[in-house]
């Protein structure tokens, strides 16, 4: 399968902070997803996953149109909003949860969110085990114009989230 250009779909980039570190995740959307609509989807997503995270602060949301190589800040109404609770320590900075899926066109997709505070013993949390992860998946599935794959198709999200220990942030904590 030939690779697709990274800018093949429109995207929103969410710049956020978690466990005293700055991070960014991207959400692919179609042209019908306005900043206000994306803000509502982002709010629902972060609210659903927030029982599983330390405080996550949405700093800036940027939009990149399909076919362009730059993004610009937009107002979604979520800037400055804090989701999640708890008091993390620096050694928790490397923990994140990964949501993965595959589009009908065969393209893999995913989203990694730092600030995870849940159980790490199994390194995978299924929808059947955790109602918050199940609710988060339901929001990703229900948003018709958001959480798309690089080919612009709606993915089938796997019914679990992987718990990851990011090696880059692990090295930063040690330094």
Image: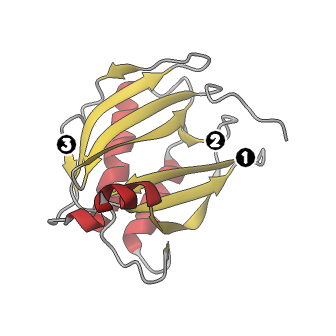
User: In the image shown, does 61 or 120 lie closer to the viewer?
Assistant: 120
Local crowd size for mark 2, using a 10 Å CA cut-off: few (<14), some (14–19), many (≥20): many
Tag 1–tag 2 contact (CB < 8 Å): yes
Of helix, strand and loop, which one carries label 2?
loop
What residue would you read off at disc 1? Answer: 107
User: In the image shown, does 170 or 85 lie closer to the viewer?
Assistant: 170
Q: Residue at x 33, y 21 (%)?
A: 73
Q: Earlier in the sequence, mark 1 or mark 2?
A: 1
Q: Earlier in the sequence, mark 1 or mark 3?
A: 3
Of helix, strand and loop, which one carries label 1?
loop
Task: From this view, report whether residue 82 is shown above or below residue 78.
Answer: below
What residue would you read off at disc 3? Answer: 81
Residue furthest to the bottom in view is 121
Residue 134 placement (x, y as % from top left): 46, 67
Q: Tell me the tag on residue 125.
A: none
Local crowd size for mark 3, using a 10 Å CA cut-off: few (<14), some (14–19), many (≥20): some
Residue 154 placement (x, y as % from top left): 64, 44
Task: Tell whether 139 sits left or right of 66.
Answer: left
Task: State how far apart marks 1 and 2 are (Cα).
Answer: 7 Å
Q: Quadrant of residue 119?
A: bottom left
Q: Quadrant of residue 25?
A: top left
Task: State how far apart marks 2 and 3 are (Cα).
Answer: 26 Å
Q: Tell me the tag on residue 149.
A: 2
Q: Residue at x 77, y 35 (%)?
A: 3
Tag 1–tag 3 contact (CB < 8 Å): no
Of helix, strand and loop, which one carries label 3?
loop
Task: Give the quadrant of the N terminus.
Answer: top right
Q: Earlier in the sequence, mark 2 or mark 3?
A: 3
Residue 18 placement (x, y as % from top left): 26, 52
């Amino acid at each position: 399968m030939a690779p697709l250009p990274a800018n093949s779909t429109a995207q929103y980039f969410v710049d956020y902070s978690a466990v005293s570190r700055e991070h960014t995740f991207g959400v692919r959307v179609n042209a019908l997803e306005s900043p206000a609509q994306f803000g509502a989807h982002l709010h629902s997503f972060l609210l659903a996953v927030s029982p599983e995270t330390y405080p996550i602060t949405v700093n800036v949301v940027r939009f990149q149109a399909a076919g362009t190589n730059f993004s610009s800040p937009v107002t979604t109404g979520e800037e400055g909003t804090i989701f999640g609770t708890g008091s993390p320590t620096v050694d928790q900075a490397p923990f994140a949860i990964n949501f993965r899926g595959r589009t009908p066109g065969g393209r893999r997709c995913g989203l990694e969110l730092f600030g995870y505070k849940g159980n790490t013993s199994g390194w995978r949390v299924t929808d059947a085990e955790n109602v918050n992860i199940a609710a988060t998946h339901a929001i990703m599935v229900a948003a018709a114009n958001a959480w798309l794959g690089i080919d612009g198709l709606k993915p089938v999200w796997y019914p679990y989230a992987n718990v990851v220990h990011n090696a880059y942030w692990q090295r930063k904590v040690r330094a």
